[in-house]
Amino acid sequence: MGVSKPGDFCIDVVMETAETLIVAIDGGGTRCRIVAQVGSDRTMVETGSANVSSDFAAAMRQIDLGLNGLARRLDVSMETLASVPAYVGLAGVTGTAIAERVRMALPFRQARVEDDRVAAVRGSLGARDGVIAHCGTGSFFAAQSGTKIRLMGGWGPVLGDEASAQWVGRRALSYTLDHVDGRRPASALAERLLAQFKDAAGIVAFASTARPAQLGALAPLVTASAMEGDALARRIMQDGAQEIDRAVRDLDWRIGQPLCLTGGIGSLYAEFLPADLRTALTDPAGEPLDGALALAEAYAREIALPGPEARQVR
């Protein structure tokens, strides 16, 4: 009941519906937002990190905390809230098994549980065909075409997350060590990083234990240095733009389709992209939470249809 597999997802344009209460959850590695909507009125509660692969129990505690807070703000019982159709997009939903585990742990009688990237795509593109490159602390790429969403990347800091903030930070440290070896020319960025970590040994020690967020925290220094014309920083941004370009082409992007750069560092790649992609750049239609609410509304419409007519409506 309401668990969809990652990969390709069916979508339809959401049509006008009666003012029915719906709930959407958008949970990621930084925060979890839980919102109830009826008509144009929204009530939202925000809690902490909710990545169900990294720490399932902690993620569910944050969701439970948020749901109880939402019930209080709506002045309804948890039993009443649990009767509302819910769309749940969470980081760490990597397959049907964990999606079902999440659904069984939720209080809702009817809920659809999916990877949080689906809501991000829907929020950015609305019902339009197009491509997004999401570059935050991590990264992923996605294309929406007709009734399908195709997801790519998002495999984490060890095996992927190209062009993400942590990728930029890690590359800056690596290129600084190349500078120490005489393989890259002098750079103000490299000198600043060597001073920050005392020397090359300090960089190696930091990198050996650094979390993705700690590496990502170096990205603003890189992007600022790139704007100042630092050759090493601009090389890193060009490398990231090449990763975006490669992913967009692999997703069969076509001229005339919008390309949205999302996430904290995403828009900063704009000037480094090829001309045809720069021309296609379009501001996101909304946020992941908007996408989650659109999907919650569609799910509510789907389950309201009689048995033989029930279908996935996205």
Image: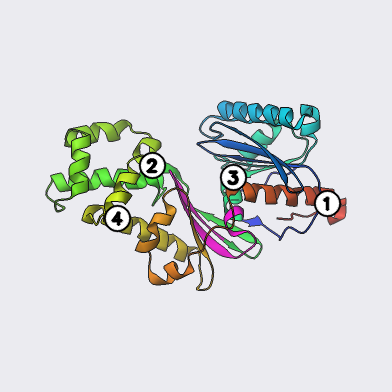
Q: Which residue is mark 2?
A: 158
Q: Earlier in the sequence, mark 3 or mark 4?
A: 3
Query: Does the segment drawn in magenta span residue 59?
Result: no
Q: Tag 3's secondary structure? A: strand
Q: Is residue 264 visible?
A: yes
Q: Tag 2's secondary structure? A: helix
Q: Amino acid at mark 3?
A: Asp
Mark 2 to mark 1: distance in Å? 46 Å
Q: Earlier in the sequence, mark 4 or mark 2?
A: 2
Mark 3 to mark 1: distance in Å? 27 Å
User: Which labelled disc corresponds to residue 18?
Assistant: 1
Query: Does the segment drawn in magenta span residue 124?
Result: yes
- Would residue 3 appear left or right of 131 to someone viewing this image? right
Q: Nearer the viewer, mark 3 or mark 4?
A: 4
Q: Residue at x 38, y 58 (%)?
A: 269
User: Which labelled disc corresponds to residue 227?
Assistant: 4
In terms of depth relative to the viewer, which is nearer, 51 or 216? Answer: 216
Q: Which residue is mark 3?
A: 115
Where is residue 48? Give x, y as percent. Answer: 55, 31
Evaluate if marks 1 and 4 touch, with contact meaning CB atoms under 8 Å apart.
Answer: no
